[in-house]
Amino acid sequence: FFFKQKTAYEIYQCDWSSDVCSSDLVYNGLVYITGATPSSDLPTVNAINSASAAGTEIFISAFDITKSGTATLIASTYIDASASDYPRSMAIDSTGLLYIAGVTYSPDIPTPGAAYQTVNSGDGDGFLLKVDLFNKQILYGTFIGGSGIDEIRRVIVETPTRVAVAEIGRAHV
């Protein structure tokens, strides 16, 4: 099990034996966490997907640090796809929309909107998702990659319509 930064919220959310919390951030008093989990019993609240499909799934959770106990978890969801998916970075824009990037081995990560690339072109491709967690929507999704294994290690939001990804290269899961 790996933590980039250990917080009480990550410890509450993640199973020490199998879940990986890969990115966290604080915005407007809420703590957001994303990671990968093979668990089928992740606590879900106001979820886009409340059950795991298969493989290692992306999860996104939000905590209200002004509350206590289990009431702190105000949103938590799986992002379903049919194989293993690993978020590496998360950012938030000025409107509260989340941007999740990483590597996917799934052929069917959600690609709503005008996707740059709608299919996984290799063994694994980078992905970028734009998520409205509180309205339970994936607004945009795309694969980014070629014939090898590619991943996105960093997402940066300049404005809600201008997003950059960085460090596309060989994945190390």
Image (cartoon, rainbow, N blue to C red):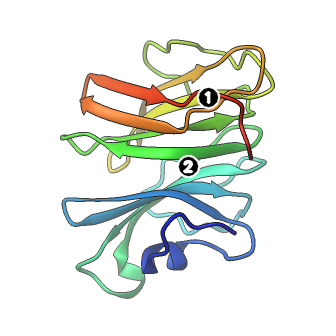
State the residue in front, 24 or 52.
24
- Give the residue at mark 1: 126
Q: Amino acid at mark 1?
A: Gly
Please report the residue visible at 57 percent of the width from the left and 67 percent of the height from the top.
3
Above or below, 118 relative to 7: above
- In the shown orientation, is residue 86 left or right of residue 22? right
Q: Residues within 10 Å of mark 1 (few under 14, many from 20)?
A: many
Q: Position of residue 157 (x, y in %)?
A: 30, 34
SS of the residue at dot 1? Answer: strand
Name the mark on residue 164: none
Q: Rounded to the nearest whole Å, what is the CA distance between mark 2 and mark 1?
A: 21 Å
Q: Is residue 157 above or below residue 2?
A: above
Return the x and y of residue 86 as percentages of the image width and height: 64, 45
- Residue in the image at 36% along x and 79% along y: 71
The residue located at (55%, 69%) in the rendering is 43
Residue at image mark 2:
49
- Amino acid at circle 2: Asn
Quadrant (top left, top right, bottom left, bottom right) of the N terminus:
bottom right
Q: Nearer the viewer, residue 53 or 131?
A: 131
